[in-house]
């Protein structure tokens, strides 16, 4: 599997699946989530509402992932996952790792071969970028998957630089 870093906007990626840094309501929010629903249009939200009416009546648990189609985005699917809110007192790293592993598992179920990830939890959920990058890159590198092309889409040059440094240091 190839891992690439891209500076840009996740909603513009021409990949099979883009991953959304959602919240457990699945009903939208700010950041990546807001951008995906804004650019993707109302079909995505309609599918999210159907998931809430069915399988995820209590919301999507933190660390889990579920797919919808991608509306007007260039991607075919959106894989929604819920990152943990960063906490200084509790180590929630396993939940953040689970977001990446579960998203790849869902991508495999869909038959997706290319997936774009944002830096989950590093915005509104407050995760430090360097630790978020380490968890993201090591989890993706170590998760068995049929996905051939994983792209991390970083929104600014600082995030890009942090991911590049961590990727360079991986064994
Ligand atoms: N493309 C790529 N990266 C982006 C984009 C974009 N269009 N927009 C922001 N980022 P965040 P979280 C970066 O806050 O921390 C929402 O309200 C951003 O700079 O989107 O997991 C949800 O509904 C940061 O580095 O996600 C949840 O309530 C990273 O993407 C909550 O925010 C993630 O930032 C989730 O918070």
Image (cartoon, rainbow, N blue to C red):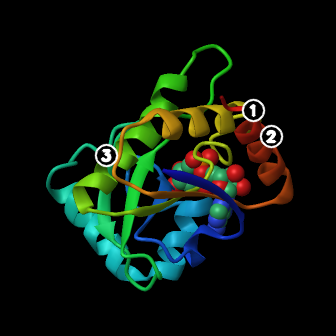
Q: Position of residue 135 (x, y in %)?
A: 59, 32
Residue located beneath label 2 in the image? 165
71 relative to 126, above or below: below
Q: What numbered label is drawn on residue 169?
A: 1
Horizontal and vertical percent position of residue 92: 53, 23
Residue at disc 2, secondary structure: helix
- Secondary element at image label 3: helix
Contact (Cβ within 8 Å) of mark 2 with mark 1: yes
Which residue sits at x=47%, y=53%? 22
Q: Quadrant of residue 91?
A: top right
Callout 1: 10 Å neighbours few (<14), some, many (20+)?
few
Mark 2 → mark 1, Cα distance in angstroms: 6 Å
Answer yes or no: disc 3 within 8 Å of ligand 1: no
User: Is ligand 1 closer than 8 angstroms to the Cβ of mark 1?
Assistant: no
**Circle 2 residues within 10 Å: few <14, some 14–19, many ≥20:** few
Residue position for label 3: 105
Quarter occupied by the C terminus: top right
Query: Residue 16 appears at what percent x and percent y?
Result: 40, 70
């Amino acid at each position: 599997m190839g891992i690439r870093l891209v500076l840009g906007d996740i909603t513009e990626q021409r990949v099979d699946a883009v991953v959304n840094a959602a919240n457990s309501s699945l009903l939208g929010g700010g950041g990546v989530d807001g951008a995906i629903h804004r650019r993707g249009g109302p079909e995505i939200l309609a599918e999210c509402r159907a998931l809430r009416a069915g399988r995820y009546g209590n919301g999507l648990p933190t660390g889990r992932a579920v797919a919808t189609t991608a509306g007007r985005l260039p991607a075919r699917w959106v894989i929604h996952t819920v990152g943990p809110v960063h906490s200084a007192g509790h180590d929630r790293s396993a939940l953040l790792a689970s977001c990446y592993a579960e998203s790849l598992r869902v991508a495999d179920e869909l038959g997706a071969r290319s997936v774009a990830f944002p830096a989950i939890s590093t915005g509104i959920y407050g995760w430090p970028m360097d630790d978020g990058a380490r968890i993201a890159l090591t989890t993706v590198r170590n998760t068995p998957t049929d996905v051939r092309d994983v792209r991390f889409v970083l929104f600014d040059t600082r995030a890009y630089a942090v991911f590049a440094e961590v990727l360079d240091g991986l064994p």
